[in-house]
Image: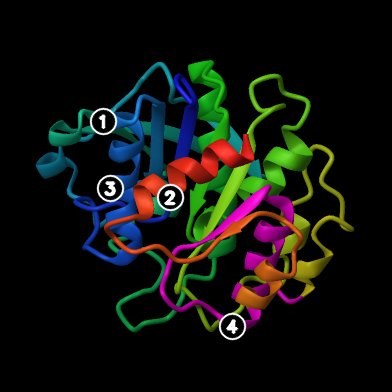
Amino acid sequence: MENTKVLFISQEITPYLPESKMSLIGRHLPQGIQERGREIRTFMPRYGLINERRNQLHEVIRLSGMNLIIDDTDHPLIIKVASIQAARMQVYFIDNEDYFHRKATFQDENGEYFDDNDERAIFFARGVLETVKKLRWTPDIIHCHGWFTSLVPLYIKKAYHEDPLFANSKIVYSAYNDDFDKPLNKKFKDKLIFENITQNDVKILKEPNYLNLSKLAVSMADATIVGSETINQELLSFIKNSDKPYLDFKSEEEYIDAYSEFYDKIL
C-alpha cells in the first residue's frame, strides 16, 4: 500500500544502544518498510548513555520547548534528531534532564530499577505524540516496540482519539522478552489520569507490574506482534485470546515482509 505512513516508537534502536533482538528490529524494520514505498518516522528515548557527539545528535529547536505536566510537576520536552546515513532515515529522540540524563536505561549500577520508570514511560509516550502533532504528520500505523512504549495505545485510544491526526491510526504493539521483576510505582495509575483517561481505564494497573502493563497495551492496541521467540507465557495466552489480529514470531529473514503484509491487513 503506497504512501502509507508508519510511526515507529521503539524502546531500543542500534547503533544508539547495544545490539539486541529489539534494537535490531528498531534499526532495520523502519528502513525495510521505507524501502517498500512507505513514509516513516522513528522515535526512541534519549537515554544518558547515548553518546551525542559520536552519534551526531542535535536539538530540533522548533519542536522543543513544550512542558509536560506529570504528577503536578512541569517537565520540559527536548527533541533531538540523528541520521542513520546508510538507511536514509532519521531518528527522533525524546529527552528531558530529570528523566534521561542518567547513564543507564532502566536500572542503576547495582541492578536496581529506577523508582521513576513509571513517569519516564508517561513522559516518553506523551512526548512522542505531542511531537508528531507538532510535525503535523498523520500516521496510518503506529507500531510500538517494548514495554516502555506500552502507554501509547492507551493515550491514542483515550486521550488523543478526537485529534484528527490520530483519529484513524491503527496501533500495533510488539511484545518482547523484556520482563522486569520489580513493580512500578504504586501511584502509577493515578499519574495516568489525563484528558478522558479514567480510573476504570487503568484499573488493571492496581498492580503496576510488567504483565499488567503489557496486557493494558494489548487490550488498547488494534493488533499485536510477538517480537521475541519466547515471551511471558501468560501474556502470550492473553494475546491469543484477545480476539484481535496477532502475528506470531517471525525470523530475521522474513519479518520485514511479514510485518508489511500485516500492516495492510490491519488497514
Badge 4 crowding class, 10 Å Cα cut-off, few under 14, some 14 to 19, many 20 or more, is few
Tag 3–tag 1 contact (CB < 8 Å):
no
Q: Colour mode?
A: rainbow
**Residue at (22% x, 35% y) in the render:** 57
The spot of residue 238 in percent (x, y) is: 70, 72
Q: Secondary structure at mark 3?
A: helix
Tag 1–tag 4 contact (CB < 8 Å):
no
**Residue at (40% x, 40% y) in the render:** 43
Q: Is residue 95 visible to us here?
A: yes
| Residue denoted by label 1 | 89
* Mark earlier in primary sequence (4, 3): 3
Q: CA distance from mark 3 to mark 1?
A: 10 Å
Q: CA distance from mark 2 to mark 3?
A: 16 Å
| Residue denoted by label 4 | 233
Task: Say left or right for 43 vs 158.
Answer: left
Question: Residues in magenta?
Answer: 207-234
**Residue at (40% x, 62% y) in the render:** 250
| Residue denoted by label 3 | 27
Quarter of the picture containing the C terminus is top right
Q: Nearer the viewer, mark 2 or mark 1?
A: 2
Tag 4–tag 3 contact (CB < 8 Å):
no
Q: Amino acid at mark 4?
A: Gln
**Residue at (63% x, 66% y) in the render:** 214
Q: Nearer the viewer, mark 4 or mark 3?
A: 4
Task: Say left or right for 223 vs 112.
Answer: right
* Mark earlier in primary sequence (2, 3): 3
| Residue denoted by label 2 | 258
Q: CA distance from mark 2 to mark 4?
A: 23 Å
